Image: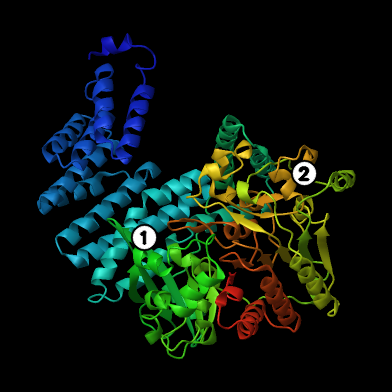
Amino acid sequence: MEASEKEDLPPVLNSNNFVNLTTNLASIYIAQGKYKKAENILLENSKHIIKNDNQILIQLGIIYWAQEQEKLAKKYFSRVINNYKNKKYKDDIFYRAKSNLASIEIRNGKYNEAEKLYLNNLNNIDTVNDNFKLLYIRNLYDLHFLYISKKDYPKATSYFLQVIEKTKTFLQKNLLFLTENEKFKFVEETKFTAKHFQDFVLKTHSQNPSITIDLFNFLLLRKKIILQNTIKTKQIIENSTNEQIKSDYQKLLNLKYQIAEQTTHLDTVKILNQKIEKLQKDISLQIYEEYPNNSSLNLIDFNKIKSELSDNEAVVEFTDFKDRATTYYCALVVRKKFKYPELIYLCTEKELQNALAKETPHTITAAHVKNIYAKDNKLYKYLFEKIEPILGGIEIVNISPSGLVHNIAFACLKDSNNVYLKDKYQIKYYVSFANLINEKDCFITQNNTNNIALFGDMKYDLNETQIQKIKNESVTRSMDMAFLFDKNKIGLQPLPATKSEVDSIETIFSKKNISCKKYTGTNAIEENFYELDNSQTEVLHIATHGYYFPDNQSATDFNIPMLNTNKIDNSYFKSGLFFSGATNSLNNDKSMANLADGILSAYEICNLNLSKVKLVVLSACLTGVGDIQQNEGVIGLSRAFKIAGADNLIISLWEVPSRQTAEFMIYFYKNIASGLSVDKAFAKAQKEMSEKYYTNPYYWGGFILLR
């Protein structure tokens, strides 16, 4: 098509928009494996645009390559490269075409030709331009893969170490200034490097044991990186003296509150999300201008972790990676005396699922826990038996879970001698081992006077008189939000044990002259929880029902009129806590208008400032579970409270029984009042409960303490 002909095209065709729409749609079909559909769209629409449009050509090459039509793929990649022959400026499409061509050469065993293409890219990519830095990193990784194919493992290792270093430099400079969607996109686009490097190290570390240090450092860099970054960004904003940043952040929070209020207006939710994305970008740019040299990365490494450990302490970094259709689980174990981390292969995800009897947190009962943990020790065999031989003399085991390991209560595992791990070790859970650096024991002392908040004995079903009384009390903050729940459980059962629980905790502290602020009955409303935002509260205890909507739970299971599919697709809306009035809202009670609905989602918790809180105790069901995302772990209540600023969390892994939960909590707070640290008070309470209910950990092992 001649240039003059192009000028006569309709505006949508006479622009980059048409090309972008075409290639974006084709990309969706390619990702779904619908190659013929993608090919048809590209070939049909290419009739209306410039014949040699490079975006179209490279996608056609990718389609043919994916279908192993190498001759056709090579033809299209070569055409793209040839189109740049007389162009001084080369964009990313040019370099991607050369990389793709090199990959074909590797598949055909033409390693020298592939090496030339990759090295030529590295020599010519403009690394000053941020837009090309990820492309440069990808080419380093491609060379790593090339040398694996050539079995040149020293060179393969050398290039991957460059990948790690360049990635770290990129993240230091850029991660703090990306929006949430951009951060997740970056992690998604670079996950292949983590997957292949773990596989490579697993296969080669016996010949080169020091490479486990590089893998350990790489996992420390990537694990929960978005969570750590989100927390750091929030801290910068909250401590900033820049009024514009603070003003924009308040606008951002207001938009998020509006999303929480939406019940059925899906188009409104989409518009609000677009506004949030724009505001996040504006705030990120302002932070960059004010703090150009700031980094959100916790640059910890193997040596720093080792220096923090005592002789009787070990670190176990769990990791999982997928190779083709199989997901593998491994552990990296670090002790003070170790020269290198010990890399141990554990099991496949299928084996782990079978050991869990394919139970989900929703379906776990007392009988299931007894079977999984107390009778059948497959979980121990898969996750800990291979680790124990190198733990001689160890008393404290620090664990950072990955994948399905987030759902495991390690204290409940029994070894081959029928001994619970909690009777052999003090087990500590960490979101990330970045939190282990300079960690101090947490004590609840008399300095906490009036800074302990207790919620319990919720009045889920309020009558009209009680609702009117709450309205008349003129609460300071309200959110008219409607949510949904399983239609078969629309009425929430009262939890009488939570009254004795919070009353007993109040009595325990009063004997130490520590006063608590207690919210029960009609006072245990969501509005009073919001009063803790940006307060001096240091201990927060909530005894109630918790909820989690798993991915595989159908929308038809819910109260359809209240369903907002846009929100349900957001993992933070799938987890939450119920406060007084929740049953009214679940039944769409109009008398709750202008009151918060009593259903507190993880999404809402993320937006609070709880940075003074040393300890959050979620004395409820399913508070430690949620959607599990690669690299980022559990997306739910625990992550939300961490983003809000809380230090330590006590959370549950299954639907805990109400009466035994109250017993556990009373033991725990008695231990706190006796002067023990939170760690030791928790371990002692677990031991005290297990002595009473030894045969079944369902009654004492469902809670974990997360740092």
* Quadrant into which the N terminus falls: top left
Residue 505 screen position, x and y as percent: 78, 73
Distance CA(mark 1)–CA(mark 2): 48 Å
Q: Is residue 124 left or right of residue 176?
A: left
Residue 177 screen position, x and y as percent: 52, 47
Residue at (19, 56) in percent of width and height: 146
Residues at discs 1 and 2 in contact (Cβ within 8 Å):
no
* Quadrant into which the C terminus falls: bottom right
Say which mark, if any, is on residue 165: 1
Near-viewer residue (568 or 339): 568
Way the structure is coloured: rainbow
Say which mark, if any, is on residue 429: none
Q: Is residue 435 left or right of residue 468?
A: left
Q: Is residue 92 left or right of residue 86?
A: right
What's under tag 2, amino acid-wise?
Answer: Ser
Crowd around label 2: few <14 · some 14–19 · many ≥20 (10 Å) = some
Residue 16 screen position, x and y as percent: 36, 23
Quadrant housing residue 148: bottom left
Q: Which residue is mark 2?
A: 478
